[in-house]
C-alpha cells in the first residue's frame, strides 16, 4: 500500500497534551484525521501500521476510548493489547511500591518498549488517589522511561485525544472556526469527575484561535497552570479567553456549547490536606440548576451542543438537547475519537516511506 505523507512523520513522539504542539501541528493532525475519516467511510483500506502493537493500560473503565483505540489499531493493520493494572503487578510510582503487588513504572515502560510500538495509559480519580496531578505524573513517568511513544488516554489533568476529536467535530460544523465562540461550561453531576476534559477543551480552543468562554460557579476553578496556558494561546493565536460565573450569560450568542461536569478542586490535594469526596459531592449538589436545557440553547447563535460522553442525562443535559439531530454533535464526537486517534498513531508509530531512486 502506498503510504501518505503524514505516516511516521513524528515517529517516536509522545502525545500527552495538545499544548505540546503548535497550531500548525494540530491542524496537520486534524487534516490527517479527516483523511482517515474519509477512508473509513468509503471502506478504503488504510493499513499504515502493519504488525505494530499498542499496549493499553486502563486504570479506569472505558467505552469510547478502549473501543476506538482497539478498532483504530485493527483498521490500521496493527493490534491493540489490553492490560488491566489489576491483573498484572500494578505499575506504580516509587512512593507507591508494595512488595509483590506492584512493579516500578520505570521497569514496566522499558519492558513494554521491547515488545511493541506504543504505550497508552488512562488514569485518574481513585487510581490516582484523588490527588490532582498524580495521574499525570504517572503518565509522565512512563514517558520518561519508555523508548516508544506514550499516549495519554486521559489523566487527571488532560484528555488530549478527546480535545482533538472535538476540534475535528467543530471543524466539520464550522470549516472556519477561528473566532467562533466556544463555551466550556460546568454542568451538574451527582458523580465526581476529573478536570481533564474542560482543561483540554480550553487549551485546544484557544490554540485554534477561538473565542473561548469558561463558565462555572465559584469554587469550580480550573488549575492555574492551564488557565495561564489558555491565555497565552489566545494571545499567540489571535483568539480570546475569558471566565464568567453565569451560565445563561455565557450561552448568549455562542456557536458551540460544551456543558460538562467536573469536581471542585479545593476538596482535593494539593489544594487540601486530604481528599474530601463527601464534601465535594455536597458542594456540587448546590448547583443542580446548572443543566443544559432547550431554553439555554435558544440563547445561542444556533449553536452546537457537545459533550465527551458519557453524559449524565437529566443532570448535565436534558434528553431534548442531547438527542436533537439539528445541533447535537454528541455522536459525531464519539466517531471522531476513532479518526483522531488513528491520526496520532499513524504519525507517531508509523514508518516513513523511503523514496525510490529513479
Image (tube, rainbow, N blue to C red):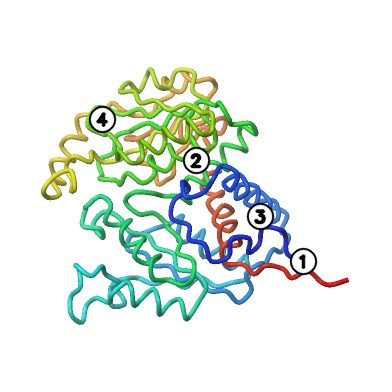
- Which residue is located at x 48 percent, y 80 percent? 115
Decide which of tag 4 and tag 2 comes sooner along the chain. Answer: 4
Q: Is residue 167 left or right of residue 138?
A: right
Q: Nearer the viewer, mark 3 or mark 2?
A: 3
Mark pair 3, 2: CA separation? 20 Å
Task: Tell me: 102 left or right of 143.
Answer: left
Marks 2 and 1 close (CB-CB < 8 Å): no
Q: Which residue is mark 3?
A: 36
Q: Which residue is mark 2?
A: 330
Report the residue marked by disc 1.
2
Say which label, 3 or 4, has the lower sequence index. 3
Q: Residues within 10 Å of mark 1 (few under 14, many from 20)?
A: few
Q: Residues within 10 Å of mark 2 (few under 14, many from 20)?
A: many
Mark 3, mark 4: which one is toward the viewer? 3
Q: Is label 2 or label 1 in front?
A: 1
Q: CA distance from mark 3 to mark 4?
A: 40 Å
- The residue depicted at 70 percent of the width and 51 percent of the height is 38
> Is 272 displayed left or right of 322 in the figure?
left
Mark closer to the observer (1, 4)? 1
In this orientation, which residue lies closer to the viewer: 298 or 152? 152
Labelled disc at residue 288: 4
Amino acid at each position: 500500500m502506498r503510504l501518505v505523507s503524514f505516516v511516521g512523520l513524528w515517529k517516536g513522539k509522545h502525545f500527552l497534551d495538545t499544548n505540546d504542539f503548535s497550531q500548525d501541528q494540530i491542524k496537520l493532525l486534524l487534516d490527517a484525521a479527516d483523511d482517515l475519516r474519509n477512508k473509513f467511510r468509503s471502506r478504503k483500506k488504510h493499513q499504515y501500521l502493519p504488525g505494530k502493537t499498542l499496549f493499553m493500560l486502563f486504570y479506569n473503565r472505558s467505552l469510547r476510548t478502549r473501543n476506538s483505540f482497539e478498532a483504530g489499531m485493527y483498521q490500521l493493520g496493527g493490534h491493540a493489547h489490553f492490560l488491566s493494572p489489576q491483573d498484572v503487578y500494578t505499575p506504580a510510582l516509587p512512593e507507591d511500591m508494595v512488595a509483590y503487588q506492584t512493579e516500578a513504572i520505570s521497569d514496566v515502560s522499558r519492558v513494554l518498549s521491547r515488545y511493541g510500538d506504543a504505550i497508552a495509559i488512562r488514569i485518574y480519580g481513585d487510581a490516582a488517589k484523588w490527588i490532582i496531578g498524580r495521574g499525570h505524573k504517572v503518565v509522565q513517568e512512563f514517558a520518561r522511561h519508555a523508548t516508544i511513544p506514550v499516549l495519554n488516554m486521559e489523566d487527571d489533568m488532560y484528555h488530549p485525544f478527546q480535545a482533538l476529536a472535538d476540534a475535528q467535530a467543530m471543524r466539520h460544523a464550522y470549516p472556519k472556526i477561528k473566532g467562533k465562540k466556544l463555551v466550556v461550561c460546568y454542568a451538574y453531576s451527582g458523580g465526581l469527575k476529573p478536570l481533564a476534559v474542560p482543561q483540554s477543551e480550553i487549551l485546544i480552543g484557544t490554540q485554534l484561535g477561538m473565542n473561548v468562554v469558561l463558565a462555572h460557579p465559584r469554587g469550580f476553578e480550573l488549575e492555574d497552570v492551564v488557565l495561564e496556558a489558555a491565555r497565552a494561546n489566545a494571545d499567540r493565536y489571535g483568539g480570546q479567553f475569558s471566565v464568567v460565573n453565569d451560565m445563561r450569560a455565557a450561552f448568549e450568542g455562542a456557536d458551540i456549547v460544551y456543558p460538562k461536569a467536573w469536581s471542585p478542586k479545593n476538596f482535593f490535594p494539593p489544594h487540601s490536606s486530604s481528599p474530601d469526596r463527601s464534601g465535594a459531592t455536597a458542594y456540587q449538589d448546590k448547583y443542580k440548576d446548572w443543566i443544559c436545557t432547550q431554553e439555554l440553547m435558544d440563547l445561542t447563535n444556533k449553536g452546537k451542543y457537545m459533550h465527551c460522553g458519557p453524559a449524565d442525562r437529566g443532570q448535565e443535559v436534558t434528553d431534548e438537547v442531547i438527542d436533537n439531530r439539528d445541533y447535537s454533535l454528541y455522536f459525531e464526537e464519539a466517531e471522531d475519537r476513532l479518526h483522531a486517534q488513528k491520526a496520532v498513531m499513524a504519525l507517531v508509530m508509523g514508518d516513513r516511506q523511503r523514496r525510490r531512486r529513479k
